[in-house]
Image (cartoon, grey):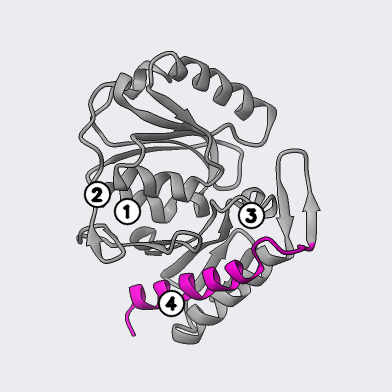
Amino acid sequence: MNYLDVAKQAACQAGAFLKEHFGKPLDVDEAKHHDIKLALDRESQDLITRVILGAFPDHAIYGEEGLAGNQDSEYQWIVDPIDGTVNFFYGIPHYCVSIALRHKGELILGTIYDPSMGDLWEVEKGSPALLNGEPISVSPRTKLEECALFVGCGKDEEALTTGLERFRKASLRARKMRMMGSAALGMAYVATGRLDAYVESRISLWDIAAGQLLLEAAGGKTELTEIPGNADAWSIVATNGKIPIEEIL
């Protein structure tokens, strides 16, 4: 079985597991002001880990819920077992499983699975981006006045301040604004032309790794800036590559 097949198998199995528990009472591991951690986050990552390491036991897992496997491996799987945990907790059916693989630091594949809609995005480096087996591309829109934009606000005071100011500025220009609650789905939506840009001042690698490769393969553009002093924290500007996004940053 090849790498992408294993990624899709892991994402779909985890997605089915999450869908079984959606809308039911949930065990909370940790609750913060702007975030929440569920036992299901850990259980979903454990399931993904079993599938991946069962196929490739010498590979590394780097996930939101911790590390597994051989951390010296040249192959590192980047896993977000539930992207959109707060949505999931509140019964909002907008969440996903995101899995990417990088080799020697270079992203080589990604998959994002939305169990609620049955949408499965996949991409391999050098190949077209696909949604449910069909090629996708970013929107052709060029004017902010025609666009739907997703601006995230992060989880700390600085990120919230930056995000809210960007949201205000963009609201004066864009057709519609959204705060979706899932970075991976936001990037998949930009790749599919459902949205025109996703911007956030602080996000983690596991939220965006699969989406970055997917979006760029679909003709879009991503700009990542690592935040000094923060463990694998990034700011991101992801667009269809055609709109003047700098006007709202």
Please identify the quarter of the rendering in which residue 37 is found.
Answer: bottom right
Camera sees residue 214: yes
N-terminal-most mark, 4 or 2: 4
Q: Nearer the viewer, residue 24 or 111?
A: 24
Where is residue 78 drawn, in percent x and y?
49, 62
Q: Tell me if label 3 and label 2 are in contact, CB under 8 Å.
A: no
- Residue 214 numbered tag: 1
Query: Is 174 colored magenta in this rendering?
Result: no
Region rendered in magenta: 1-27
- Amino acid type, mark 1: Leu
- Residue 9 numbered tag: 4
N-terminal-most mark, 1 or 3: 3
**Residue 11 appears left or right of 159:** left
Compared with 167, 105 (above or below) is: below
The residue where tag 2 is placed is 218
**CA separation, marks 3 and 2?**
28 Å
Circle 4 — which element?
A: helix
Residue at screen point 50% across, 86% down: 54
Task: Classify 10 Å Cα crowding around label 1: few (below 14), some (14-19), many (20 and above).
Answer: many
> Mark 4, mark 3: which one is toward the viewer?
3
- Residue 88 numbered tag: 3
**CA separation, marks 4 and 3?**
21 Å
Circle 1 — which element?
A: helix
N-terminal-most mark, 1 or 4: 4
**CA separation, marks 1 and 4?**
18 Å
Residue at screen point 65% across, 53% down: 91
**Residue 1 appears left or right of 32:** left
N-terminal-most mark, 4 or 3: 4
- Amino acid type, mark 3: Phe
**CA separation, marks 4 and 2?**
22 Å
Camera sees residue 72: no
Task: Classify 10 Å Cα crowding around label 2: few (below 14), some (14-19), many (20 and above).
Answer: many
